[in-house]
Image: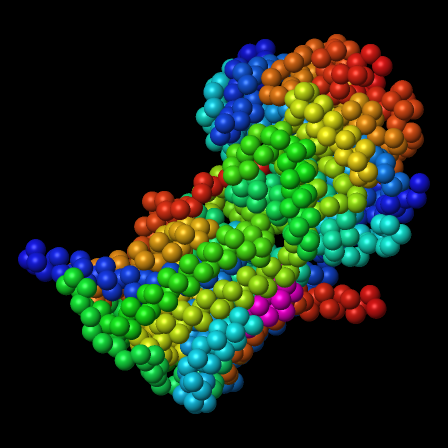
């Protein structure tokens, strides 16, 4: 491999990595915001993305609705579904036993239901492609080739993340979410309604998943198994520390770039392995992740 | 002194819940065991080869469940790589039989030991983490192993799968499910007995102590980390044995069936049966193994029903099917 | 004076920690009432039962004449019953300003919230200096002030104070109790849980002593200060 | 054999910037009951957790029977004859009373293969029955620990600690939350354990009635520093102790 090729690959890897990484970052954000406020790693996050993608596909292709209706409708549906799952199912699970493991198993259950449901409707039988939002045209940035669609994906994801962080930092509801994450008891004592905040957090997480789905679907073939993209989200979240939202974003971009580097420099067959190796490496070398705080001493 | 202290501490007002009646329980347990043994013996004389295939498969699931029971149920460590160890067991015993021509009891032991050894190493690494990090690390390991199975063509046959030659013992060859059945039954029974012995022993007590409170376990002189790693290794050993049991009656294995889905299937069985009890693990394997076999024709329904079962059990019967039935009967008896 | 808060025969339990059994007490409007007792006697459980963090198994809790024993915790705060929890229950990674603003979470009158914010900073000038600082980095005394300030931001009618002297040096204890006195003079009703009997009895007008989840003793604070049984509870004489 | 079973010198513990314990010394004589008291947040539990090896001290030395255990792992202490209980109860909640105590005998239950594999190893079981009887728990042997009432849970923790057959028993607030008659029974039990069986006891306690009745020596901590030490009478008449507990005004009340 000559130096020129290495340079070309580096540029291409970073450019493509940032695009796909922005979607991973969104998914990681959706995972982490739930984990921060309720200590549940949501194993159905990937299927939420998948289901939202199919809702959009259904409305767009089978109901022939215009895009400007399909997008908000999809996001809203995902918001409502996730919030209801929290309220109706997880609240009851917490009441019945309360151990985090049971909550995790319930989210695994949801992932199965969603996947089975999509297969049942028949959409999942054959891989489908999502009609592109805009006609992709190739653009050169440096020596890296990207498409206009790529730029739309990256811009949208970054805007959504910015909006999310603004909401989290400056609005009353965002502050309440942070408060619940830091100290649920104190949050209750200042009058925060935990049930409501948990619903909103799940709803938001569902909404972000839907946005990720709308962004990624035109680039991949849709199948009922496309929820496995969540692995990238988990990898990103772990790399970032799992409790840090900025960490999730940085982790997402990192995983995207690593994945592209592995594909370009090593082998396209090894791409699938990249996130797992990243997860294991981080967990072994720095279990608290890049942005995770120190583990506190358990009080006895 | 002792008499006085009994008087000083009054009994609770209501009758104590959770007070077991050892006598009657032993009786029903004994009766159930006898019934089960009888059924296992007469089964091959009554049914077709297909039913025996299902029976073999259920017995494999029982051993898988017992392994997961040791690490999740007894020790409280949420590990998600069971299918990977199962796969290591299948390939190890398959290869030992195919390439080396080993007799199956030896290749079976080798399968268990190789899986167990990998389990110890992974456990030592993954158990630096708690709770969900452990779950995520083992999940990542499981996925990575599936990738290895798919891509290590020379050994596993990669995406083409691997033909497993018949299990051999001297000149004896296991060619049908009916011939494999006695082997599978005996191994499964041995593993059940082993589980009961472990569970009742000092080791089993230390596992449960770690599950209930690791700080208290430490204060009792239990090296907590070593106990967790031991449980993890044992669990992998069980999965390896289960894999080699599968290899005695199967002729073909494909990496597709060694992924996260299989881990979740086993987890579902253990959870639905009732986390923490051997009866639950065995019962869950049978009940859920049958359900999943009935649903095999319609994979989409199968997934929906799996999912719903997990959700509904977590919502209304978090302690599993058997505890739920027991509570229900207790409530009915009390009126 | 009418009773602002009234507990009758309240029993509650706290996970596996012991229950409150049949606790009755009342807090007249405008007064400071102290709730004393050794560690584990049930003082905090009583406050948490009132704040609705712990389910009440039996008995009644009335605030301003209305039953609140089965209300949701955020409704109780809305009604004007606000707890200052024991220890360092601040929002560690938020700034002092954000912590105070969280206190007004349920209020919908932004103008008077801003006025209250200024008023509280006048009470606690130390906090004004540290408005942008992370709450987790404050000293123990400052965190205690922040907790009280945060509770005041909710505009309470009844303040439940849990061990405000905990882990503070005698000088700081005096200072905090000076604030408590001033708040009461300004018309705030206070139910005070304390280990430091001397300070609590000199600040309050009436006191209850809990032992093992049950009321052991009650009376005017002036009289209890000279009662030997109080000393016995604390020093085992 | 050292005269002091436990000797702690210069113990200092810092969490971040906070000094929880500062250059603390304590010597516990063999065969005595020694109490460690002080107001909430004084550093008692931190000290206690260092001695039982759950926390790492920033500086200082811990000698057990003359042997340095400052860096020993917590799980090694039971084997050295050190048993402890927990302030907030750390029972094996889903296990029966019998099993809880059985796990307490962990270091004694594995002398042989047959013993290690047995559900009821000989030699251990008799001792457990004896402990259950002593603590009045025999009737609850098959009850799941989390279903016991609070008083019995505290006793179970004690029985479980005794199953270690300790030389040194570390009790973290054994009387907290107990009713008066239960405290009286605890008083009798602890005295008996020390006087008749020679078990050395170090306890952290808030219930003064118990501390004053059973202790040979009392050490008082405030703000992480030792402020007094002596017999119960000496300590309770020490003005600095009264001030720490009741506040300045009641010193002469």
The image shows residue D23, relative to residue A46, as above or below, that is above
| Residue lying at 26% horizontally and 77% vertically, measured from the top left | A136
Where does residue D53 sit, x and y in percent of width and height?
52, 29
| Residue lying at 80% horizontally and 68% vertically, measured from the top left | B333
Magenta-colored segment: predominant secondary structure: helix
Asked if residue A250 can be seen in this view, the reply is yes
For the N terminus of chain C, which image quadrant?
top right
Where does residue A102 sit, x and y in percent of width and height?
57, 61
**Front-lying residue, A296 or D18:** D18
Q: Which residues are magenta?
A: A81-94
For the C terminus of chain C, which image quadrant?
top right
**Front-lying residue, D16 or B131:** D16
Displayed quadrant of residue B251: bottom left
Color theme of the render = rainbow
Q: Is residue B31 part of the magenta span, yes or no? A: no
Where does residue A70 sit, x and y in percent of width and height?
45, 80
**Front-lying residue, D240 or A174:** A174
**Front-lying residue, C187 or D251:** C187
Q: Is residue A93 part of the magenta span, yes or no? A: yes
Where does residue A35 sit, x and y in percent of width and height?
50, 56
């Amino acid at each position: 491999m000559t130096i020129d090729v290495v340079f070309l690959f580096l540029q291409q890897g970073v450019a493509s990595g940032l695009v796909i990484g922005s979607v991973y970052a969104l998914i990681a954000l959706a995972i982490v915001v739930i984990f921060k406020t309720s200590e549940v790693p949501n194993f159905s996050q990937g299927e939420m993305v998948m289901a939202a993608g199919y809702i959009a596909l259904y409305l767009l292709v089978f109901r022939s609705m215009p895009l400007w209706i399909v997008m908000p409708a999809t996001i809203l549906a995902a918001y409502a579904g996730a919030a209801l799952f929290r309220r109706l199912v997880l609240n009851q699970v917490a009441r019945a036993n309360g151990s985090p493991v049971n909550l995790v198993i319930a989210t695994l259950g949801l992932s199965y239901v969603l996947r089975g449901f999509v297969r049942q409707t028949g959409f999942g039988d054959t891989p489908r492609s999502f009609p592109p939002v805009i006609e992709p045209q190739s653009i050169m940035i440096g020596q890296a080739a990207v498409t206009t669609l790529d730029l739309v994906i990256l811009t949208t994801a970054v805007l959504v993340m910015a909006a999310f962080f603004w909401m989290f930092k400056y609005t009353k509801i965002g502050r309440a979410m942070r408060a619940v994450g830091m100290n649920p008891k104190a949050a209750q004592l200042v009058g925060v309604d935990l049930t409501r905040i948990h619903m909103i957090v799940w709803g938001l997480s569902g909404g972000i998943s839907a946005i990720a789905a709308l962004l990624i679907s035109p680039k991949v073939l849709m199948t009922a198994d496309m929820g496995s993209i969540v692995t990238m989200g988990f990898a990103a979240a772990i790399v970032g520390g799992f409790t840090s939202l900025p960490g999730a974003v940085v982790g997402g971009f990192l995983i995207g770039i690593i994945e592209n580097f592995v594909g370009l420099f090593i082998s396209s067959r090894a791409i699938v392995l990249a996130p797992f190796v990243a997860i294991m490496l981080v967990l072994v070398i720095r279990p608290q992740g890049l942005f995770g705080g120190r583990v506190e001493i358990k009080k006895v | 002194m002792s008499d006085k202290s009994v008087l000083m501490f009054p009994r609770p007002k209501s009758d104590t819940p959770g007070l077991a009646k050892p006598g009657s329980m032993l009786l029903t347990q004994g009766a159930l065991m006898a019934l089960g043994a009888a059924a296992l013996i007469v089964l091959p004389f009554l049914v077709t080869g297909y039913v025996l295939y299902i029976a073999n498969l259920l017995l494999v699931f029982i051993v898988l469940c017992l392994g997961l029971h040791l690490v999740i149920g007894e020790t409280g460590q949420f590990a998600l790589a069971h299918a990977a160890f199962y796969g290591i067991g299948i390939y190890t015993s398959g290869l030992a039989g195919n390439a080396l021509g080993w007799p199956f009891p030896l290749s079976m032991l080798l399968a268990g030991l190789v899986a167990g050894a990998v389990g110890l190493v992974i456990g030592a690494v993954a158990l630096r983490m708690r709770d969900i990090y452990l779950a995520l690390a083992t999940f990542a390991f499981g996925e990575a192993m599936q990738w290895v199975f798919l891509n290590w063509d020379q050994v596993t046959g990669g995406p083409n799968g691997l033909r497993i030659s018949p299990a051999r013992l001297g000149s004896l060859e296991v060619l049908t499910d009916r011939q494999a059945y006695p082997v599978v039954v005996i191994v499964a029974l041995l593993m059940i007995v082993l589980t009961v012995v472990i569970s009742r022993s000092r080791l089993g007590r230390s596992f449960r102590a770690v599950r209930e409170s690791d700080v208290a376990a430490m204060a009792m002189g239990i090296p907590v980390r070593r106990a967790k790693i031991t449980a993890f290794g044992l669990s992998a050993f069980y999965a390896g044995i289960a894999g080699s049991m599968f290899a005695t009656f199967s002729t073909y294995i494909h990496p597709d069936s060694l992924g996260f889905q299989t881990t979740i299937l086993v987890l579902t069985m253990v959870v639905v049966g009732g986390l923490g009890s051997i009866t639950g693990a065995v019962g869950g394997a049978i009940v859920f193994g049958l359900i999943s076999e009935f649903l095999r024709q319609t994979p989409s329904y199968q997934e929906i029903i799996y999912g719903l079962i997990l959700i509904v059990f977590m919502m209304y019967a978090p302690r599993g099917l058997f505890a739920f039935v027991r509570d229900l009967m207790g409530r009915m008896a009390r009126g | 004076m009418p009773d602002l808060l009234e507990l009758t025969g309240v029993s509650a339990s706290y996970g596996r920690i012991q229950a409150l059994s049949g606790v009755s007490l009342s807090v007249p409007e405008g007064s400071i009432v102290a709730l004393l007792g050794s560690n584990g006697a049930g003082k905090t459980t009583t406050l948490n039962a009132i704040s609705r963090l712990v389910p009440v198994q039996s008995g009644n809790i009335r605030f301003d004449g209305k039953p609140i024993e089965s209300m949701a915790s955020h409704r109780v705060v809305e009604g004007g019953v606000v707890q200052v929890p024991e220890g360092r229950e601040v929002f560690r990674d938020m700034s002092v300003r954000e912590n105070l603003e969280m206190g007004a979470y349920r209020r919908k009158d932004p103008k008077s919230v801003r006025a209250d914010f200024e008023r509280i900073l006048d009470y606690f000038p130390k906090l004004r200096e540290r408005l942008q600082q992370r709450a987790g980095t404050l000293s123990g005394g400052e965190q205690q002030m922040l907790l009280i300030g945060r509770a005041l931001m909710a505009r309470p009618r009844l303040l439940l104070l849990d061990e405000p002297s905990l882990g503070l040096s005698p000088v700081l204890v005096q200072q905090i109790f000076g604030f408590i006195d001033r708040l009461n003079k300004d018309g705030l009703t206070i139910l005070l849980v304390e280990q430091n009997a001397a300070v609590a009895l000199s600040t309050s007008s009436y006191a209850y002593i809990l032992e093992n989840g049950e009321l052991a003793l009650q009376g005017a604070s002036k009289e209890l200060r000279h009662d030997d049984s109080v000393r016995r509870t604390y020093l085992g004489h | 054999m050292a005269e002091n079973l436990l000797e702690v010198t210069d113990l200092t513990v810092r969490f971040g910037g906070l000094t929880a314990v500062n250059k603390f010394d304590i010597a516990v004589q063999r065969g005595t009951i020694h109490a460690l008291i002080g107001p909430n947040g004084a550093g008692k539990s931190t000290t206690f957790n260092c001695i039982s090896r759950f926390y790492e001290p920033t500086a200082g030395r811990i000698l057990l029977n003359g042997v340095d255990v400052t860096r020993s792992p917590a799980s090694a202490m039971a084997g050295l004859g050190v048993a402890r209980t927990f302030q907030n109860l750390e029972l094996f909640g889903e296990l029966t009373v019998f099993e809880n105590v059985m796990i307490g005998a962990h270091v004694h239950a594995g002398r042989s293969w047959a013993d290690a594999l047995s559900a009821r190893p000989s030699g251990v079981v008799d001792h457990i029955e004896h402990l259950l009887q002593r603590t009045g728990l025999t009737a609850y042997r098959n009850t799941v620990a989390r279903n016991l009432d609070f008083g019995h849970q505290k006793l179970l923790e004690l029985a479980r600690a005794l199953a270690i057959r300790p030389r040194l028993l570390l009790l973290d607030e054994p009387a907290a939350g107990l009713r008066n008659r239960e405290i009286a029974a605890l008083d009798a039990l602890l005295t008996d354990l020390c006087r008749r069986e020679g078990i050395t006891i170090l306890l952290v306690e808030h219930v003064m009635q118990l501390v004053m009745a059973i202790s040979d020596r009392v050490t008082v901590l405030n703000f992480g520093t030792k402020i007094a030490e002596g017999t119960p009478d000496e300590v309770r008449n020490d003005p600095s102790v009264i001030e720490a507990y009741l506040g300045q005004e009641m010193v002469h009340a």
